[in-house]
């Protein structure tokens, strides 16, 4: 089922103030993976569209990645951390069960008056966070919110399983939202969950029972994914929810300037593109460089498109995160951010073109 979370009638709208992202410096190429499993660059790229992925090393943490993404977003907005009064951290791979990632970030970025909490919604977490934050801003409870998505799946990947180890990368992305009495850039939104498919993509904990009682059966803490079922879920659900949310915004698919989807797999994106009939140039794709970064994939792709000039002020975007749960979050928004980073540095990313069809 899906839950309609369109905005209530209040005196506040929501505007976008900044965007940022961060990926660890260490890169693992497809050729590197041949040292671990029987695979090749051609095998991986033809099935997934992925050429490389960024991974943490040593003691790098979820909070480290998230802090870097937030600092980038603050630079984009020309803001200081002390202006933030709400932090929502979307992560399914936290460093600690408690304290929450948001609490640690509050201290790291100097947001001393901010409150915060975490959302564990895997690949849909970033959009879930945006929709959740917007409710607080519309109600006037808070004025400035940061939604940050940060995931490290390289520590939960079975590196002997070539069907899953080729997919995942690590990264973080953040967006800054503000309450605004005159403008509203979040045009429509929708959340959905189909819990009957929850077992198709899982990551279990490895905690054990008290030694005075029967032990818990041993398991593993690696990602498990039924790729075939998740493919069917995504290809059936995402086009449906995008059509629905565009209609709620009083628009058509032709009115969209860009579509930013969770960067799961090129074959999933190809199938969705075919169902929706959206021109290839409107789809923002960068999974070839980062792989599947879970909750971080949408802001990583969006941030790159802002920096290279594809996404401009006034553009209309549809965003959809989808995955474990099985859950999805979808929104249509107008890009209002005047990015303070643009023109201050030369973009040096070696953007690789990727063909969808």
Image (cartoon, grey):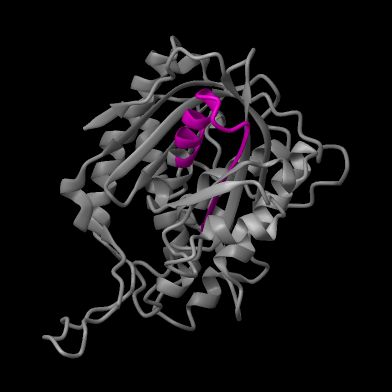
Residue 127 visible in the shown view: yes
Q: Residue at 75% x, 37% y: name it.
A: 77
Quadrant in the picture for the N terminus: top left
Residue 66 visible in the shown view: no
Q: Residue at 54% x, 73% y: name it.
A: 31
Asked if the stretch drawn in magenta spans residue 320, the answer is no
Nearest the camera: 349 or 97? 97
Query: Outermost residue toward the left?
Result: 214
Quadrant in the picture for the C terminus: top left
Question: Residue 25 lies in what quarter of the image?
Answer: bottom right
Nearest the camera: 255 or 172? 172
Nearest the camera: 184 or 331? 184
Asked if the stretch drawn in magenta spans residue 133, the answer is yes
Q: Position of residue 104 (x, y in %)?
A: 59, 62
Query: Outermost residue toward the bottom?
Result: 211
In the image, 311: left or right of 118? right
Magenta-colored span: 129-150
In the image, 192: left or right of 89? left
In the rendered view, would you say 241 is above or below 290?
Answer: above
Q: Position of residue 255 (x, y in %)?
A: 51, 14
Q: Residue at 75% x, 40% y: name it.
A: 76
Q: Position of residue 146 (x, y in %)?
A: 60, 42
């Amino acid at each position: 089922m899906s839950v309609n979370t369109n905005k209530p009638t209040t005196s506040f709208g929501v505007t976008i103030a900044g965007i940022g992202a961060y990926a660890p410096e260490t890169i693992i190429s497809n050729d590197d993976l041949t040292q671990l499993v029987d695979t090749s660059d051609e095998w991986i790229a033809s099935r997934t569209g992925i050429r490389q992925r960024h991974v943490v090393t040593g003691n790098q943490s979820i909070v480290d990645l998230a802090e870097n993404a937030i600092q980038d977003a603050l630079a984009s907005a020309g803001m200081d951390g002390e202006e933030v009064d709400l932090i929502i951290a979307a992560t399914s791979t936290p460093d600690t069960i408690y304290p929450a990632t948001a609490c640690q970030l509050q201290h790291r970025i100097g947001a001393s008056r901010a409150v915060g909490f975490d959302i564990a919604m895997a690949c849909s977490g970033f959009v879930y966070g945006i929709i959740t934050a917007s409710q607080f801003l519309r109600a006037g409870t808070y004025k400035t919110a940061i939604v940050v998505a940060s995931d490290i799946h390289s520590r939960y990947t079975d590196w002997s399983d070539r069907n899953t180890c080729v997919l995942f990368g690590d990264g973080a992305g953040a967006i800054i939202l503000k309450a605004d009495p005159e403008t509203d850039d979040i045009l429509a939104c929708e959340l959905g969950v189909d819990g009957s498919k929850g077992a198709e993509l899982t990551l279990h904990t490895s905690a054990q029972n008290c030694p005075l009682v029967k032990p818990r059966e041993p398991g593993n803490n690696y990602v498990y994914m039924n790729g075939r079922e998740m493919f069917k879920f995504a290809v059936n659900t995402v086009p449906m929810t995008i059509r629905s949310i565009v209609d709620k915004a009083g628009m058509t698919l032709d009115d969209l300037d860009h579509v930013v989807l969770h960067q799961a797999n090129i074959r999933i994106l190809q199938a969705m593109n075919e169902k929706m009939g959206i021109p290839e140039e409107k789809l923002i794709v960068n999974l070839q460089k980062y792989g599947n970064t879970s909750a971080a994939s949408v802001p990583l792709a969006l941030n790159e498109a802002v920096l290279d000039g594809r996404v401009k002020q006034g553009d209309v975007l549809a965003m959809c995160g989808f995955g474990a749960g099985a859950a999805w979050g979808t929104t249509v928004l107008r890009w209002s951010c005047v990015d303070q980073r643009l023109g201050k540095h030369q973009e040096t990313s070696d953007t690789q073109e990727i063909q969808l069809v």
